[in-house]
Amino acid sequence: MPDNGHKLVIKSVSKTFQTKKARVTALQETTFDVREGEFVTILGPSGCGKSTILRVVAGLVEPSSGQVLLDGREIKSPGADRGMVFQSYTLFPWLTVQKNIEFGLELKNVDKRARAEIAQHYLKLIGLSGFENVYPVNLSGGMKQRVAIARALANEPEILLMDEPFGALDAQTRTIMQELLLSIWEETKKTIMFVTHDVEEAIFLGDTIYIMTARPGRIKEKIRVGLPRPRDYAVKDAPEFLEIKRRILELIREESIKAANAV
């Protein structure tokens, strides 16, 4: 059962890496939780441990201390109950769009007809119907990330983990992808953890924003985003949006100055 009704619980998680010269603490004891269907965004200065948290939840990195519980079960390794979307394009270049989406389903021995039906559903959801037989080399960056999102969702994960997935996109494409992701979230109500360095993106997408300190990272502040849903791009000009943005920029600036002075 979920811990206290929460989908994901991160309890006193820390992470220290051993380099050739020294031990580096990337993440101090960090505790927070994510509700079922919640869209959580994580912000902080460079090197604060944002991606480390995501990788611990994904099971790709083992915490030095603490534990992570998903639906009450401790995470110790990667699993199909977590879908991951990275900033870099991770599609298999030798597979078509549809085969990329079907890849995880094939590993789970889902039959061919069911795989095709699921892939078609998500192709429609991401607006790429008709691109089934196209190879990644012929897709734009935004289209590649749409396919990566569809591939992650096709496996029906309990939580979707997104590590700056729009960071490499141009501003216009990034805006379109933000709106697309929100429309997908509105339809699926999938629980999402989304790491970003973009303040406006974090506010526009999130229900809750966690602000992290400079390294060693920990949670500095939790901000609830009370903006109504569904949202469109016009909300970025709303006084409530701009007030949240001002508050976050002050917090990030404090931590960025600390990070610069520590160098």
Image: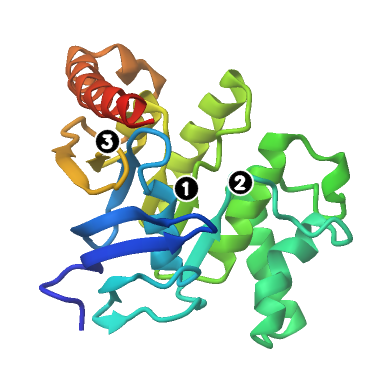
Disc 2 crowd rating (10 Å Cα; few below 14, some 14-19, many 20+) is some
Does the residue at mark 2 contact the one at mark 3 (Cβ under 8 Å)?
no
Which is more N-terminal, label 3 or label 2? Answer: 2
Give the labeled residue for mark 2. 126
In the rendered image, residue 233, in percent from the top left (x then y), is placed at 40, 21
Residue at 31% x, 19% y: name it: 235
Left or right of residue 173, residue 111 in this image: right
Q: Which element is circle 3 on? A: loop
Residue type (three-letter) at the residue carrying disc 3: Arg
**Residue under label 3:** 229
Which quadrant does the C terminus fall into? Answer: top left
Type of the residue with mark 2:
Ile
At a point 48% along the width and 51% down the height, the residue shown is: 162
Indicate left or right for 113 with 180 as reference.
right
Q: Are marks 2 and 1 in contact (CB under 8 Å)?
A: yes
Q: Earlier in the sequence, mark 2 or mark 1?
A: 2
